Image: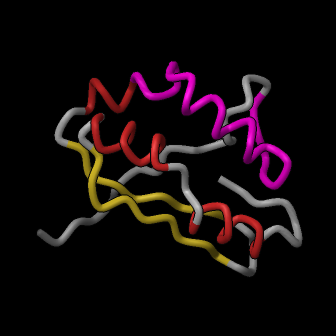
Amino acid sequence: MKLNPGQEAVYRKRHEEIWPELVKLLKDAGISGYSIFLDPSTLTLTGFLTTDNPAEYDLLPQSPIMQKWWHYMKDIMETNADGSPVAIRLEEVFHLP
């Protein structure tokens, strides 16, 4: 994902004030340990999460709460036509268990 220039503080603030209904949605989908990292030199965001239910995770884009969050965030980051953040799935090349 990628932020628009100058939006770092807004992005952080919005996540500090994340909606309780969004947190519930994510947890109900089996998500835990969700972190988002920012590369300040490129404004690239990389998310890392674990889920015990990949099928539920794949359904999140259909949730009205998720779509509302995307709409809320689209003014500060690159988005697709449906409002979702432009995201590229990264290929894991190494993992130390």
Q: Quadrant of residue 12?
A: bottom right
Q: Magenta span has 17?
A: no
Name the foreground residue: 87 vs 49. Answer: 49
Say which residue appears at 74% left-offset and 31% top-offset.
83
**What sort of colour scheme is used for the picture?**
secondary structure
Say which residue appears at 41% left-offset and 50% top-offset.
91
From the image, give the main secondary structure of the stretch colored magenta. helix
Q: For the image shown, how many numbered marks are present on the structure?
A: 0
**Residue at the outermost left position:** 97
The x and y percentages for residue 53 are 21, 33
Q: Which residues are magenta?
A: 59-80
Say which residue appears at 58% left-offset and 44% top-offset.
88
Residue 16 as seen in the image, left or right of residue 83: left
Q: Quadrant of residue 39?
A: bottom right
Image vertical order of residue 80 relative to residue 82, above or below: below
Name the foreground residue: 46 vs 32. Answer: 32
